[in-house]
Each structure stands twice: as structure tokens, then as C-alpha cells.
Image: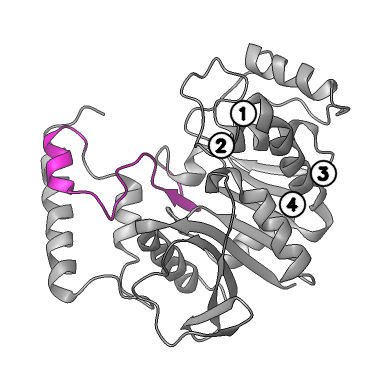
Amino acid sequence: MSSAVCTLFEGDYHHGLAGLVNSLHRHGYRGNLWAGYRGALPPWVCDMKGKDGDQAFEAAEGLTIRFLKVETQRHFTNYKPEFMNHLRLNHAKDLGMMFYFDPDIVLKTKWKFIEQWAGCGVALCEDVNSPMHSTHPIRMRWSRFCASHGFTVARVLDVYVNGGFVGVSQGDWEFVETWKRLLDLMESEASGLSKLGISDRSHLFHKPDQDALNIAAMFSHRPVSIVGREGMDFIPGGYLLSHALGTCKPWRKSFVREALRGYPPTMADHSFMQHTASPINLFTPAVRCLKQLDLQIGCAIGRFYSRQ
């Protein structure tokens, strides 16, 4: 069964894209990675091949990044299901499965397992802020909102999933369409989708893309397969994905400085640093050496001092 991976990035998130690509290659993924972007292409791109807006970069034998320039007023996080739908209709019509990854995630397990996971239902990971009880007032308000737009409940959920990863088979594509439809409905309720979200969680749609994903999990009649918070390294014991949360991403971070503030290197920091050299080389040998030393000293400090 053929599969494709997609992501959306801009600015210095090209570092995260490289880490994602390197981790996919190491764990056996071969195929296309469709990368929607705004602004400039990554500085590590070379030997571009492509036409008609399809810019292809062979990152390694059997793994090709296909860059697509995206024109949208929406924040990229609120554009995910629309991008997936665009790919399916225009570039990847015959795919068996499609997987969306945020560009601050790296893969930790064999690619074959990821495909097996999506074969069990729409593949989703529990969020760091999970759970959200089935009787939570926000979830109850979601139900009223959706009922007013003709949706019927498919399942009762107590978990809240993260919007950084979704794996879907062709037979479950209705889930992506439901996710997209919900985001479209939210646009007026959330005063547009050009921002990441609304700071106040009491708002019905605090993080539109992620809330819409969670609502889709409640109202789509396609099966879902949800792993716990360990699935993205939010708690120890994970072996699937590692997701770098917050604005201080691993490629921006001074590990020593953060450790002195009481925040030692995270599992996501370690995972990213393991995937900076091959097949895409992000750093010169000298810079990589300094980054690794920074990481090691940050870990040493963290053994004695931590707010976490």
C-alpha cells in the first residue's frame, strides 16, 4: 500500500523539517514528503528538480521532498486538513495512506508500525493537556455547536488529542473532510483563522485546528486509534514520536541557558539532536560539536537543578 507524508513549514522551521526527514529515512520511510511552505526554501536545498510549481529535492535514495508554495491567509496550523485535501485531489490521488506531521516532530519507531497503526483507524496521539472528560463543559458546548450544524455523535471520548500528527487511510478520508468542514465553520466563531489560537481556554475554540480535530474524533463515523501521552514523549515511556512543544524549539535553544533557568533538555531535544546529520546535514562539524556539548552540559545541570 502506497503512503505519503506531508507537513507545513515557514521560517526557521526548515530545521525541524530536516530533522523529520532524517528520522523518517532512518526508520524506513521511502516515498514522497509533500512540504507546503511560505517564504524562502530551506538553505540546505540543492539540485532542485521540478516543474509546474512542483519543486523536488531528493533527500536520499527513495525519499523525495516535494515543495509546494502555499498561498493562504490562515495560520499554517489551521490549514492542515485543507492542505491534505489539496494533495489528495491534485497530487496524490492514488495513495493508500497519508500522514501529516508537524515540522517539530521526529519519528522514533519503524515506519511499518506507523502504517499498521493507521490501518487500525485514524491514527492520533493524546495531547499533553489531556484528558478532557466527556462531560467537560467545553466538550458539551462543542456538542451543541455541532448538533446545530447537522452533526451526530459517533463516539464518547475522555481524551484530548494533539494536532501535530494525523495518519489516515483512503477508506477513512471522510475524517479529514469532517476536520476541514469543522475548521471552516469555526472561522467566524474564532474571528478568523489567521492566528494560532485564542489565549483564553474558556473560549469555545481555544486552538481551532486542535479543537476541530478533537471534535472530528467525536463526530466522524470513521474509526480512530488513539495512543496515550507517551506517544509524543509528553511523559516517559514513549517509542513512537517526539514532539517539541512551545516556542523555544531545539534548534533555537541554548540547552545550558535553559537548564540554568531550571528547564533541562527534554526528550524532544535529545530526539531532534539525533537527527541533524543524515541524510540532510544541518550543521557544520564545529557547530554540531558545540551543540552536542551544550546538550551534555545542560543535562548535567539538570541532574541537580530542575523546576520540572
| Residue 10 in the figure: left or right of residue 162 | left
- At 65% from the left and 68% from the top, the residue drawn is 4
Res. 124 image quadrant: top right
N-terminal-most mark, 2 or 4: 4
Q: Are marks 3 and 4 in contact (CB under 8 Å)?
A: no
Q: Are marks 2 and 1 in contact (CB under 8 Å)?
A: yes
Q: In this view, does 55 lie to the left or right of 91?
A: left
Q: Nearer the viewer, mark 3 or mark 4?
A: 3
Q: Residue 65: x percent and y percent? A: 52, 74
User: Can the viewer see residue 139?
Assistant: yes
The residue tagged 4 is 120
* Distance from the alpha carbon under mark 2 to that under mark 1: 7 Å
Horizontally, residue 59 falls left or right of residue 137, namely: left
Residue in the foreground of this view, choosing between 26 and 239: 26
Q: Residue 270 carries which label?
A: none
Q: Which of marks 2 and 3 is nearer the N terminus?
A: 2
- For the point 70% across and 64% down, the residue is 87
Q: Give the alpha-carbon distance from disc 4 to disc 1, as whole Å.
A: 18 Å
Residue type for callout 3:
Arg
Camera-side residue of 100 and 232 = 100
Magenta stretch, residue numbers: 237-263
Residue 222: image tag: 3
Could you tell me the amino acid type at mark 1?
Val
Is 143 located above or below residue 61 in the figure?
above
- Residue 149 is situated, as x and y percent measured from the top left of the image, at 84, 26
Q: Quadrant of residue 227?
A: top right
Q: Residues within 10 Å of mark 3 (few under 14, many from 20)?
A: some
Q: Earlier in the sequence, mark 3 or mark 1?
A: 1
> What residue is disc 1 on?
159
SS of the residue at dot 4?
Answer: loop
Q: What element carries label 3?
A: loop
